[in-house]
């Protein structure tokens, strides 16, 4: 089991990023920290897909016909996901700025109390 973890260290890094991102999103009461946790979680997913698409000794499918080929699809999907992630982060941070301007706090529990009293 230990040999598998040492030889596949990118999977260990993936699950560490997923765990840290999930923990930050759940445990933190600050909205900015939740957005940061979401970005860490997204990075773990990106790493997982790229690591799963890795082919030992693989070549681009255009150049040769004899060696194992690497599919470009996971890489293209991750590039698209990165763009979507950046846009999602920008929208989330824009909403955080508006929430702070409206309520004067970024604490989740304080926001629930203020919204409950309205």
Image (cartoon, rainbow, N blue to C red):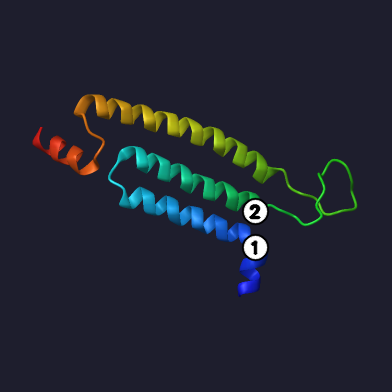
| Location of mark 2 (residue) | 51
Quadrant hosting residue 57: bottom right
Alpha-carbon neighbours of circle 2 within 10 Å: few (<14), some, or many (≥20)? some
Q: Which residue is mark 1?
A: 8
72 lies left or right of 28: right
Image quadrant holding the N terminus, namely bottom right
Q: CA separation, marks 2 and 1?
A: 9 Å
Numbered disc 2: secondary structure:
helix
Q: Position of residue 99 (x, y in %)?
A: 26, 29
Q: Quadrant of residue 111?
A: top left
Considering every residue shown, the one lying at the far left of the view is 117
Residue 13 in percent (x, y) is at 56, 56
Image position of 29 (left or right of 93):
left
Q: What residue is rendered at 71% in x and 53% in y?
A: 54
The reply to whether discs 2 and 1 touch (Cβ–Cβ < 8 Å) is yes
Q: How many marks?
A: 2
Image x and y of residue 41, in percent:
47, 48
- Which quarter of the rendered picture does the C terminus lie within? top left
Local SS, label 1: loop
Left or right: where 107 falls relative to 26? left
């Amino acid at each position: 089991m230990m040999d598998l973890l040492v030889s596949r260290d990118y999977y260990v890094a993936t699950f560490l990023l997923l765990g840290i991102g999930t923990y930050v999103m759940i445990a933190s009461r600050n909205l900015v920290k939740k957005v940061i946790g979401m970005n860490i979680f997204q990075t773990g997913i990106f790493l997982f897909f790229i690591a799963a698409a890795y082919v030992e000794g693989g070549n681009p499918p255009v150049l040769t016909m004899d060696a194992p080929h690497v599919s470009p699809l996971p890489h293209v999907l991750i590039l698209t996901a990165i763009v979507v992630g950046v846009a999602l982060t920008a929208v989330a941070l824009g909403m955080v700025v508006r929430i702070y301007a409206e309520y004067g706090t970024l604490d989740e529990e304080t926001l629930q109390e203020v919204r409950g009293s309205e």
